[in-house]
Image (cartoon, grey):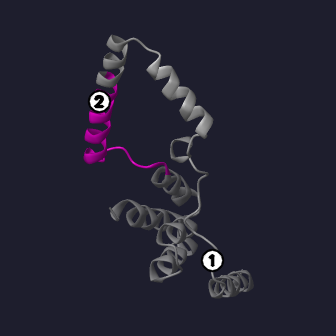
Amino acid sequence: MKRLVLSFLALLILASSITPLSAAVILPASPATEEPSPAAVKAAIEGFKSLPKAERKLKIKELRKELKKFKVAKKAGNEPSTNTVLLVILAILLPPLAVYLHEGVINKRFWISLILTLLFWLPGIIYALIIILGDK
């Protein structure tokens, strides 16, 4: 058992000396962040222009209401991002990895999380959740 732990620690030290490529890339880009094709934009504009004047005003009014709702929700910040939810799930499964992905580098928080996880699983999970949910 002691040999296994020492081998694991040696592997972690070796892995920490390698520069990470990108710790921030966790999720694929959401469709909302991608730019639509120029043809789709042109078709949407033409479709909007072909509407009667009363319908266009109604669509613009609805759009303004939705934009207000979005701004209020964004200011409130009540809903956690997808990234945070995934880090919480990962913190339950592999606490040190979740701390590393949250921090972006191997630092003292990562090592504390690793030691707590190796000694007892539950303190490692609690510490990782504190790190991930505490930094806002």
Numbered disc 2: secondary structure: helix
Tell how many labels. Answer: 2
Residue sitting at x 73%, y 81%: 4
Label 1 crowd (10 A; few <14 / some 14-19 / many >=20):
few
The picture places residue 29, in percent across and down from the top left corner, at 58, 50
Magenta span includes 28: no
The picture places residue 55, in percent across and down from the top left corner, at 36, 13
Residue 66, quarter of the rendered image: top left
Residue 73, quarter of the rendered image: top left
**Residue holding disc 1:** 20
Most frequent secondary structure within the magenta stretch: helix
Quarter of the figure with the C terminus? bottom left
Quarter of the figure with the N terminus? bottom right
Numbered disc 1: secondary structure: loop
Which residues fall within the magenta stretch? 62-82
Q: Residue 87, labelled with which disc?
A: none
Residue sitting at x 36%, y 18%: 56
**Residue holding disc 2:** 64
Q: Earlier in the sequence, mark 1 or mark 2?
A: 1
User: Viewer-proximal residue, 71 or 96?
Assistant: 71
Above or below for 3 versus 82:
below
What residue type is disc 1 on? Pro
CB under 8 Å between callouts 1 and 2? no
Above or below for 96 versus 5:
above
Above or below for 123 versus 50:
below
Magenta span includes 70: yes
Residue sitting at x 54%, y 75%: 114
User: Viewer-proximal residue, 39 or 85?
Assistant: 39
